[in-house]
Image (cartoon, rainbow, N blue to C red):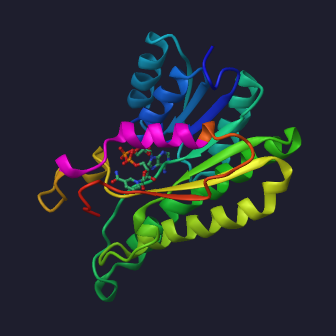
């Protein structure tokens, strides 16, 4: 029997990258996983891999910043699985907005909102059932950019820094009611988020998405007497 047997995990951004690797690993450890992203084909492909390996996976196409769509996703997920024990808030995207002095206000707000709104909305929708059960775990996938300053990334970094404070405040609000709230702040991870550009750090030196997934699994498997709080996971060779 898997170490997460009987538990249901909702993973946003589960179609590819860190979210997909986390979904596969949690499913290998017995969790039923529900994936959310906007690209149907990637969700289908990840879910198919999980099912082929003997796991249980469901998927939902939605933009995490769309409250109505996320309400439907969470209701549908509850309809199928009856429970959500684990929430991994992982959906996000990196967007350089350039120097603040030259940045485009529309792009700036879109980047901030796109990396923050879904974290709040999904948590807001899933949390009541966790509190009712008196147990649950939330892992917010943030970034080193939420803790250290990188020129050009002001909107993304502000979203991730806000996510960190959100994590701290939520943890304070719910820790005595059985819900564990944790944040992981990875440095550069070798996924599609970096695109194909020439100015990206050396992919060989980045963290593998599978390593982030393993770390999230270890966080979730901690005994209930402790919490990870916030964890910086950096490439061994020190880039980003
Ligand atoms: N890779 C890194 O170097 C790195 C470092 C630190 C932190 N992170 C964080 O890790 C998380 C995952 O990143 P990744 O590297 O795995 O990127 P990725 O490979 O681009 O995957 C991102 C996932 O999030 C989904 N997504 C993005 N915006 C969404 C939205 N509005 N609604 C629903 N789904 C959405 C994407 O699917 P669709 O586009 O199909 O919706 C995709 O499944 C992000 O929050 C990112 O900020 C990444």
In the picture, the quarter occupied by the C terminus is bottom left
Q: Name the residue at 73% across, 35% down.
A: 75
Residue drawn at the location 80% of the way across and 62% of the way down: 173
Residue 68 vs residue 224, the one in the foreground: 224
Q: Position of residue 146 (x, y in %)?
A: 46, 69
Left or right of residue 169: residue 234: left
* In the depicted structure, whether residue 73 falls above or below residue 163: above
Q: Horizontal and vertical percent for residue 57?
A: 55, 21
Which residue does the image show at 17% across and 50% down from the upper left?
A: 196
Q: Magenta stretch: residue 214 in it?
A: yes
Residue span colored magenta? 203-219
Residue 153 placement: quadrant: bottom left
Q: Position of residue 108 (x, y in %)?
A: 41, 73
Q: Is residue 175 above or below residue 32?
A: below
Query: Which residue shows up at 63% across the image and 43% down it?
Result: 69
Q: Position of residue 48 (x, y in %)?
A: 44, 17
């Amino acid at each position: 029997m898997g170490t997460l047997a009987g538990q249901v995990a909702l993973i946003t951004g589960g179609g590819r990258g860190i979210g997909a690797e986390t979904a596969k690993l949690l499913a290998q450890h017995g969790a039923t996983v529900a994936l959310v992203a906007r690209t149907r084909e990637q969700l289908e492909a990840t879910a198919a891999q999980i099912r082929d390996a003997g796991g249980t996976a469901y998927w939902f196409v939605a933009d995490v910043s769309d409250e109505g769509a996320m309400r439907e996703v969470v209701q549908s997920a509850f309809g199928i699985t009856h429970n959500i024990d684990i929430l991994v808030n992982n959906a996000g995207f990196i967007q350089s907005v350039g120097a603040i002095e030259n940045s485009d206000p529309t792009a700036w707000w879109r980047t901030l909102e796109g990396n923050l709104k879904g974290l709040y909305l999904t948590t807001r929708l899933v949390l009541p059932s966790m509190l009712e059960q008196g147990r649950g775990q939330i892992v917010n996938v943030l970034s080193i950019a939420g803790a250290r300053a990188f020129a050009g990334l002001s909107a993304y970094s502000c979203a991730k820094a806000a996510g960190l404070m959100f994590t701290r405040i939520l943890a304070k609000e719910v820790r005595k009611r059985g819900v564990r709230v944790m944040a992981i702040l990875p440095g550069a991870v070798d996924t599609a988020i970096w695109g194909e550009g020439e100015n990206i750090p050396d992919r060989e030196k980045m963290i593998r998405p599978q390593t982030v997934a393993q770390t999230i699994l270890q966080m979730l498997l901690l005994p209930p007497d402790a919490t990870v709080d916030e964890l910086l996971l950096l490439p061994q060779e020190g880039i980003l």
